[in-house]
Image (cartoon, rainbow, N blue to C red):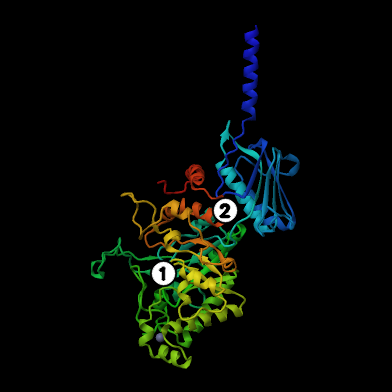
Amino acid sequence: MKNVLKMLLIIAVFVSCQEKHIDKNVSLIPKPRKITFGDSYLETGTSVSIKSAEELQKQAGYLSGILPEEWAVTAPKDAGLTIELQIDKTLKVNGQEADESYKLQIDDDKITITGRTKAGVIDGINTLHQLLLTAPRVDGKKRLPELTIEDYPRFAYRGMHLDVGRHFFPPEFIKKYLDIMALYKFNKFHWHLTEDQGWRIEIKKYPKLTEVGSIRKETLIGHGGRKRSEYTYDGKAYGGYYTQAEIKDIVAYAQERGITVIPEIEMPGHSLAALASYPELGCTGGPYEVATHWGVFEDIYCTKESTFDFLENVLTEVMNMFPSQYIHIGGDEAPKTRWKECPACQRRIKEEGLKDEHELQSYFIRRIEKFLNRHGRSIIGWDEILEGGLAPNATVMSWRGTEGGIEAAKQGHDVIMTPGETCYFDHYQSKNKNEPLAIGGYLPLEKVYRYEPVPESLNAVEAQHILGAQGNVWTEYMPDSKQVEYMILPRMAALAEVDWTDKKKKDYADFSKRVKEHFKMYRKLGYNYCDH
Ligand code: ACM
Ligand code: ZN
């Protein structure tokens, strides 16, 4: 009898421990600043009501769209669980008054998300979304531990870029890309819309940009060989573009997720598709052809007056589609060959008292900057815009290493870090033989993770000019959206932690454990990813 009692006692203790068992290993990426766990948990399966202030109606709509199916949204009186969204302009985290601060509190019958700003509320929603997607199921129900997360980002600019010029991706995929960005709390989508190989944005005043410029007659197969004569082509016409209505819809979709869409209209180089559409924009008058292979092309916009009229008209329509403060105007890889031989460009150099073609490029960018500044917008340009003198208010995107970024910050300009060696997601991720064809390079996950965007050579004041880091996705060798997913996942997760998490809190071994949980999430969501 004594033994039976003892046995019953052991069973009772075991059962109560089981009931109390709460998995306190959440796999959040990026890692939040502060997380404290309670002693209970919340289960999905009940109905939910969302409570929010009038000003947070849009955020409440976004939240209701990402809740798991088993959590039907109902009226407050029928709900087993309430999720409340609120703004508290005095919210501090770790004593800091950071704009994007948020607090996420999960109790057993209530979830509260408090943001210092709307952006903070969205960050909190995205954290909850990730918790739900990665939560373990117990008896068929998802279980979230009771917890409080207090958090804010290290950098204000957390960017992902996508080149839709080399290959075109449909609007549905752009939305999926934005969904993945939101999941990892990226807030700037740099949309590279014009290229030598295709113009992808409808401009009503210049219909040929899409009628002619969005289509190339064929595409290079593979790397083509070293000599142009060895190149082989697929013989198939390729094209696509976004209508203004599609663009506005995508901009609104991004906005709902706390993401600003920054359009890039390339100039003066990478403009062959525009020249093929309107040959009078080039120095020689053409004829030109939309490019069918990759690289840098010598035909670029001429600096004659009519080119500026064209670009201002294009940018006027662009500003109407994109509310973004920043407009990216490219500026990279513009050979000066044609300008050296062009009477109009040489006349411009003389009349403006410029030293050479580099100063002519600087004149070009400054003129465009003045136009955009007059309309209340600011420019971002690739680091070549430093050559010949930086436009006064320009933000520099440092891609040829970090030197351009360092130089710009020392001159007092804002900088976005996208150096090729740590931020180019078109490079190979592994040295495996079966790795799909990529442009070249080698950028494994760990190297992305260990990237530190603030160069040591900057002092504290200069370091303030580093706004954040961005992953670049050039798509010469990404013919479809599945390949884009493969190239960004999971490297984007690593970059998310570079941009968000405090330097001191980063830990690659710990990140690796969390990223494995994210692989499960990718499989559930049907995302293609690289699992080396
Ligand atoms: C670039 O990769 N040409 C900016
Ligand atoms: Zn010219």
Q: Residue furthest top?
A: 1
Residue at the disc numbered 1: 198
Name the kind of residue labelled 1 in the image: Gly
Ligand 2 shows up in the quarter that is: bottom left
The reply, left or right, for residue 221 in relation to residue 490 is left
Residue in the picture at 64% in, 29% down: 20
Residue 285 in view here? no
Q: Residue 524 location in percent, x, y? A: 50, 43
Q: Earlier in the sequence, mark 2 or mark 1?
A: 1
Q: Residue 334 location in percent, x, y? A: 40, 76
Judge by depth and name the residue closer to the eye, 252 or 503: 503
Which type of secondary structure does the marked residue at label 1 adopt? Answer: strand
Which type of secondary structure does the marked residue at label 2 adopt? Answer: loop
Q: Residue 223's quadrant in the figure?
A: bottom left
Q: Is mark 2 within 8 Å of ligand 1?
A: no
Judge by depth and name the residue closer to the eye, 453 or 373: 453
Residue 273 in view here? yes
Q: Residues within 10 Å of mark 2 (few under 14, many from 20)?
A: many
Residue at the disc numbered 2: 501
The reply, left or right, for residue 342 in relation to residue 82 is left
Q: Residue 451 location in percent, x, y? A: 48, 57
